[in-house]
Image: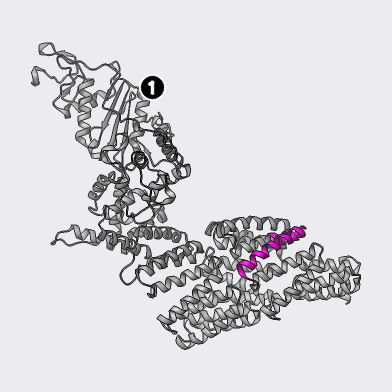
C-alpha cells in the first residue's frame, strides 16, 4: 500500500529499503510496521519522554514509596504494573514522580515515559510522542504511532534487539475506559505505574491505596515548609493545624503557602503574631469559605493547578453519571453533614434519607416522567460510585461505620450548596439519624451520637425553625446522658439553651425543656446544689408560663425533689415527693407512669432518710401495681424488683436481698441478655450482697469478672465501669488485701480526677477510699492526715450536713483512734453524733453506726484508763450486737474480737468462749 511522502510500508517484519534511501526497520504486528523516516533517527538511550512534575517543597517520604519499588508482592508474584490510588490531594502524583525520578537518576532505566493521563487523547498523544522520539516515527497519525510504541514495548522473540529497561507512568487516569487498548505490555524489561482516583476492577495490576499523611508526616511537612521560608511556629499549633486540615497533603501545602504569602490579619487578641493560630481561627469560622483560605489559582505551590476546594469537583461529576444517575452527588451531600470517621450505612439508606434523595431524582426528571422512589439498592449504587472515585471509603462489612469521608471533601461539598439546599440537607441528615436510634448503651448509639454532633456542628442554626428546633437536638443530649456521658451532655445542653433562648425565646416550651436537661446534667456531673438552684428557678418559670398542673411542671418538680436528696436533704426530698405524688394522683391518675415514678422517688428518699424498711414496703406495694399495669417482663417492673431487693438488704435482710437478686438476674438474662446494662447492674448488686453475707473473696472475684465485661461493653471511662472499680477495690480490702485496695483506689482517684475534676463527689469518694484503706493497711496516722485535708474539701463542696461530709468525719475520727488517739476519736464521734441526730434523726443507720463507733472508742478509753474489765464488758456487748447482723469474720467483727481479747487478757478463741458464757 502507498505510504505518505513516498514511504512504502510493507506487511513484513524484515528490514527493507524504501525510496529516497529511507531505511525501514521494525517488526511485524498486524498490518503496521514501525519505520524510520528519512532524515530522522531514534534518539539515543537513556531517554525521557514527558516532563516529570517538580518535586514538592518539603517532600515527605512515605511507606508507599517502598511498595512502588518492590519487585515482587508478598506472595512472590512479579510486579509489572502498579496502581497507586486514592482521593484527590493525597499526593499520588508526587509519590509516583519521586519513584520515577529515583529510578531515573539511579541508572535503573533506559526509557522513562511520563503521561498526563486525564483523558484518552492525552494518553494517545503522549504515546505517539514516545514513538516519534524513540522510533523516529513520522508524526501525523497519533493512534497508529501510539500502537507502534506499545508494540515496541512488547517482549521480543529470542535473538531480537532488546527494547531496554523502561518505565511508563500513567498519571491521573480519570476513567479506565480511557486506557482500553493502550495498556503497556507485561514485560520483564519494563514496569507501569498508574495513579488514579478510581477503584474500578478494570484497572489491572497490584493496587496500592494511598491515604493522607500520618500525623507525624503532616507536622514534619509543615515544619519543613515553613522553615524554608524563615518561619518557626509553635509546634503545638502546627500539630493542631495539621489535624484541622485532616493531614491532607494538598491542603497542607496550600495552607502553608497561604500563611507564608499572606500577612494574615489577626483574628483575635490571643492570636497576635502567630500565623498558625490565626489561620486556624479563620478556618474554624463557618462563615469563611474554604476557597478564601487558599492561594489564588495562579499562585499555587509546586506547580499545582487546582485548589483544594475545587479538586474533587470533576470526580463528583463523574460519579453522578454512574448508575443510578444523579444520586451520587446528593448522597455525598448527605454524608458531608455527618461524622467523617464513620457513618452507618443504615443512616444513608433508611426512609428519611431516601426521601431526601428522591427529591433530587424529581428535580432531574422532566414533567412527563414518572419518578421512581429511591430504593436501598439505589443508595448502595450511589455509595459504590462515590467509592469508585475515591470520594468516600465504603466498607459494607463494617455496618456501624461503613462510610468514611475526608473532612475537607465534606467541607467543599457543603460550601457548594445554596442556603436553601444546605438547610434541606442538614435537616434530612437529622431525620435520618433519628430513624431507629437504638438503646443508648449499644455501640451503634455511640456512632450515631458522633454523627449527630457532626450534623449539629455543620448545621449552625439550620436545625431551628421559626417555632421549634429539630428533635435531634434534644434527642442526642438525652442519649448522651443515658449513656453516662454527662460532661458532654452538659456542654450540649448549655449550647442548646443559649441558642434556643436566642432563636425561640426565653419562654418557649423547648427552651424550658433544654433548661430542665441542663440542670439535670449539672447534677450528674457532681453539682447537685447547682442543679437544685437551676431547677428551682425553672419551676418558677414553668408555674408562670405553663401552670401548676402541666406535665412539664410536674416533671420539673420531680427533678427538683430528686436533686434536693442528692444534695444531702433526704428528708426534704421525701417530703417533696409525697406532695408531688398527691398532685400526680389528682392530675394523671394512679396508673400513669409518672405517678408510679413518683412513688419510686418517695420510697427511695424515705429509705435514704433512714426508713429502709418503709422503703422496702412501699416498693413491694408498687411492684404489685406494676405487675398489674405493666406486666412481669416490663423493664420498669424489673427495676422495681431491683430496688426492692436492695432496700430489703439495707433494712437488714441480707439473705433475702441476695435471693431476690439471684432470681432477678435469671430473668434479666432471659429477657435482656448478658450484655444489657441492667443485667450488669443486677450482677453488681448480687455480688455486693453476697459479700455482705460473708463471702468477701467471692464478691471481689465477681466484681473482677464484671469489670472485664464493663470494659468490653462500656469502655474504661464510663461511670458504671468506674463504679465497678470502686466495688472491686473495696471488696478486695474486705477480703483482707487492704494494701491492694488502697492501691486500686489511688489508681481510680487519678482517673476520676482526669475525667470528672477534683470536686466531683465520686472523685472525693475515691480519695476517701485511698485514705481508709491506707489506714486499714497500717498507716493510720498518715491516713488521718489525708482525711483531714479531704474533710476541708467536703465542707467546701457539699456543705457540713451532706451525708458524704458526715461519713468523712466518721472515718477521720476512726482513723484518729487507730493512730493511737482514742480520746480524740471519742470526742470527734460525740460531736458527729450530735450532728447526725440533728440532721438525720435517731433511727438513721448512719446515726446508729456512729453511736456504736463512739461506744467502741469509749470502751478503749476505759481500758487504757485501767478498767480492763469494763472495756471487755462493753466490747463484748458490741460484738454480740454485731454478730446478730453481720458475718463473724468481716473486718469490723474481727476488730471487736481482737480488742475484746486484748482487754479480757485472753486469746481470741478464749474471748469467743467468754462471750458464749456471758
Q: Is residue 204 visible?
A: no
Q: Say which of 575 and 130 sits in front.
A: 575
In the rendered image, residue 777 lying in the magenta stretch gets the answer: yes
In the rendered image, residue 735 lying in the magenta stretch gets the answer: no
Q: Determine crowd level at label 1: few under 14, some 14-19, many 20+ residues with C-alpha closer than 10 A.
A: few
Residue 813 x/y as whole percent: 75, 67
Q: In terms of image quadrants, where is residue 820?
A: bottom right
Q: Is residue 290 above or below residue 80?
A: below
Tally of numbered discs: 1
Horizontal side, residue 877 vs residue 111: left or right = right
Horizontal side, residue 573 vs residue 167: left or right = right
Q: In this picture, which residue range is highlighted in magenta?
A: 770-799
Q: Say which of 875 and 702 sits in front.
A: 875
Residue at 22%, 61% (x, y): give it. 372
Residue 701 x/y as whole percent: 66, 60
- Name the residue that disc number 1 marks: 106
Q: In terms of image quadrants, where is residue 63?
A: top left
Residue 61 x/y as whole percent: 42, 33
The quadrant of the image that shows the C terminus is bottom right
Residue at 54%, 65% (x, y): give it. 525
Amino acid at each position: 500500500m502507498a505510504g505518505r511522502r513516498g514511504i512504502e510500508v510493507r506487511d513484513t517484519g524484515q528490514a527493507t529499503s524504501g525510496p529516497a534511501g529511507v531505511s525501514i526497520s521494525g517488526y511485524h504486528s498486524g498490518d503496521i510496521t514501525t519505520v524510520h523516516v528519512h532524515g530522522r533517527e531514534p534518539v539515543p538511550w537513556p531517554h525521557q519522554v514527558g516532563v516529570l512534575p517538580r518535586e514538592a517543597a518539603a517532600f515527605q517520604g512515605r511507606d508507599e514509596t517502598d511498595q512502588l519499588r518492590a519487585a515482587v508482592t508478598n506472595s512472590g508474584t512479579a510486579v509489572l504494573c502498579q496502581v497507586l490510588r486514592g482521593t484527590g490531594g493525597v499526593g499520588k502524583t508526587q509519590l509516583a514522580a519521586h519513584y520515577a525520578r529515583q529510578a531515573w537518576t539511579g541508572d535503573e532505566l533506559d526509557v522513562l515515559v511520563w503521561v498526563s493521563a486525564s483523558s484518552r487523547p492525552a494518553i494517545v498523544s503522549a504515546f505517539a510522542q514516545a514513538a516519534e522520539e524513540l522510533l523516529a516515527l513520522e508524526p501525523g497519525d497519533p493512534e497508529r504511532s501510539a500502537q507502534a510504541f506499545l508494540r515496541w514495548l512488547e517482549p521480543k522473540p529470542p535473538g531480537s534487539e532488546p527494547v531496554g529497561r523502561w518505565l511508563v507512568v500513567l498519571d491521573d487516569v480519570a476513567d479506565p475506559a480511557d486506557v482500553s487498548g493502550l495498556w503497556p505490555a507485561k514485560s520483564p524489561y519494563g514496569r507501569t505505574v498508574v495513579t488514579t482516583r478510581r477503584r474500578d476492577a478494570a484497572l489491572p495490576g497490584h493496587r496500592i491505596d494511598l491515604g493522607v499523611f500520618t500525623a507525624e508526616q503532616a507536622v514534619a511537612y509543615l515544619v519543613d515548609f515553613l522553615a524554608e521560608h524563615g518561619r518557626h511556629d509553635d509546634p503545638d499549633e502546627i500539630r493542631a493545624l495539621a489535624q484541622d486540615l485532616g493531614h491532607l497533603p494538598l491542603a497542607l501545602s496550600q495552607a502553608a503557602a497561604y500563611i507564608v504569602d499572606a500577612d494574615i490579619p489577626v483574628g483575635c487578641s490571643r492570636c497576635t503574631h502567630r500565623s498558625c493560630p490565626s489561620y486556624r481561627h479563620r478556618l474554624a469560622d463557618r462563615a469563611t469559605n474554604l476557597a478564601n483560605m487558599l492561594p489564588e489559582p495562579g499562585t499555587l505551590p509546586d506547580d499545582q493547578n487546582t485548589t483544594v476546594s475545587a479538586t474533587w469537583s470533576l470526580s463528583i461529576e463523574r460519579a453522578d453519571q454512574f448508575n443510578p444517575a444523579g444520586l451520587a452527588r446528593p448522597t455525598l451531600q448527605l454524608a458531608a453533614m455527618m461524622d467523617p470517621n464513620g457513618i452507618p450505612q443504615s443512616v444513608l439508606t433508611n426512609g428519611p434519607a431516601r426521601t431526601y434523595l428522591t427529591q433530587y431524582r424529581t428535580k432531574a426528571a422532566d414533567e412527563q416522567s414518572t419518578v421512581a422512589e429511591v430504593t436501598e439498592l439505589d443508595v448502595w449504587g450511589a455509595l459504590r460510585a462515590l467509592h469508585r472515585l475515591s470520594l468516600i471509603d465504603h466498607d459494607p462489612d463494617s455496618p456501624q461505620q461503613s462510610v468514611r469521608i475526608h473532612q475537607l471533601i465534606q467541607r467543599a461539598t457543603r460550601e457548594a450548596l445554596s442556603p436553601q439546599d444546605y438547610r434541606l440537607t442538614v435537616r434530612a441528615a437529622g431525620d435520618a439519624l433519628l430513624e431507629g436510634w437504638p438503646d443508648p448503651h449499644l455501640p451503634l448509639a455511640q456512632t450515631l451520637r458522633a454523627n449527630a454532633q457532626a450534623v449539629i456542628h455543620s448545621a449552625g442554626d439550620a436545625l431551628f425553625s421559626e417555632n421549634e428546633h429539630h428533635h435531634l437536638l434534644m434527642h442526642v443530649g438525652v442519649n448522651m446522658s443515658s449513656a453516662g456521658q454527662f460532661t458532654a451532655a452538659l456542654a450540649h445542653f448549655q449550647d442548646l439553651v443559649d441558642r434556643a433562648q436566642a432563636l425561640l425565646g426565653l419562654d418557649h416550651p423547648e427552651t424550658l425543656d433544654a433548661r430542665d436537661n441542663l440542670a439535670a446534667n449539672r447534677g450528674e456531673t457532681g453539682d447537685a446544689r447547682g442543679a437544685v438552684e437551676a431547677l428551682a428557678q425553672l419551676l418558677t418559670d414553668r408555674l408562670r408560663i405553663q401552670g401548676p398542673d402541666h406535665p412539664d411542671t410536674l416533671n420539673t418538680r420531680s427533678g427538683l425533689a430528686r436533686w434536693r436528696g442528692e444534695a444531702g436533704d433526704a428528708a426534704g426530698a421525701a417530703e417533696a415527693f409525697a406532695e408531688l405524688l398527691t398532685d400526680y394522683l389528682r392530675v394523671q391518675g394512679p396508673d400513669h407512669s409518672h405517678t408510679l415514678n413518683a412513688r419510686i422517688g418517695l420510697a427511695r428518699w424515705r429509705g435514704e432518710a433512714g426508713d429502709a424498711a418503709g422503703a422496702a414496703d412501699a416498693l413491694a406495694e408498687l411492684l404489685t401495681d406494676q405487675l398489674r399495669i405493666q406486666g412481669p417482663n416490663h423493664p420498669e417492673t424489673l427495676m422495681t424488683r431491683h430496688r426492692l431487693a436492695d432496700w430489703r438488704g439495707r433494712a437488714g435482710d441480707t439473705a433475702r436481698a441476695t435471693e431476690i437478686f439471684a432470681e432477678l438476674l435469671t430473668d434479666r438474662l432471659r429477657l435482656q441478655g448478658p450484655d444489657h446494662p441492667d443485667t450488669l447492674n443486677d450482677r453488681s448488686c448480687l455480688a455486693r450482697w453476697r459479700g455482705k453475707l460473708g463471702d468477701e473473696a467471692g464478691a471481689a472475684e465477681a466484681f473482677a469478672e464484671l469489670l472485664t465485661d464493663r470494659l468490653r461493653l462500656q469502655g474504661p471511662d464510663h461511670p458504671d465501669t468506674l463504679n465497678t472499680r470502686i466495688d472491686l477495690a473495696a471488696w478486695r480490702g474486705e477480703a483482707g488485701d487492704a494494701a491492694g485496695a488502697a492501691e486500686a483506689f489511688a489508681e481510680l482517684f487519678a482517673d476520676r480526677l482526669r475525667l470528672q475534676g477534683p470536686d466531683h463527689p465520686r472523685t472525693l469518694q475515691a480519695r476517701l477510699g485511698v485514705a481508709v484503706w491506707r489506714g486499714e493497711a497500717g498507716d493510720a496516722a498518715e491516713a488521718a492526715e489525708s482525711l483531714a485535708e479531704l474533710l476541708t474539701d467536703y465542707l467546701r463542696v457539699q456543705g457540713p450536713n451532706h451525708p458524704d461530709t458526715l461519713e468523712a468525719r466518721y472515718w477521720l475520727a476512726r482513723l484518729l483512734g487507730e493512730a493511737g488517739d482514742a480520746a480524740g476519736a471519742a470526742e470527734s464521734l460525740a460531736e458527729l453524733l450530735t450532728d447526725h441526730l440533728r440532721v438525720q434523726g435517731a433511727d438513721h443507720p448512719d446515726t446508729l453506726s456512729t453511736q456504736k463507733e463512739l461506744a467502741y472508742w469509749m470502751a478503749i478509753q476505759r481500758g487504757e484508763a485501767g478498767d480492763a474489765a469494763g472495756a471487755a464488758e462493753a466490747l463484748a456487748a458490741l460484738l454480740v450486737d454485731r454478730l446478730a447482723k453481720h458475718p463473724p469474720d468481716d473486718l469490723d467483727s474481727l476488730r471487736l474480737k481482737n480488742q475484746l481479747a486484748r482487754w479480757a487478757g485472753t486469746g481470741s478463741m478464749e474471748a469467743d468462749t467468754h462471750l458464749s458464757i456471758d
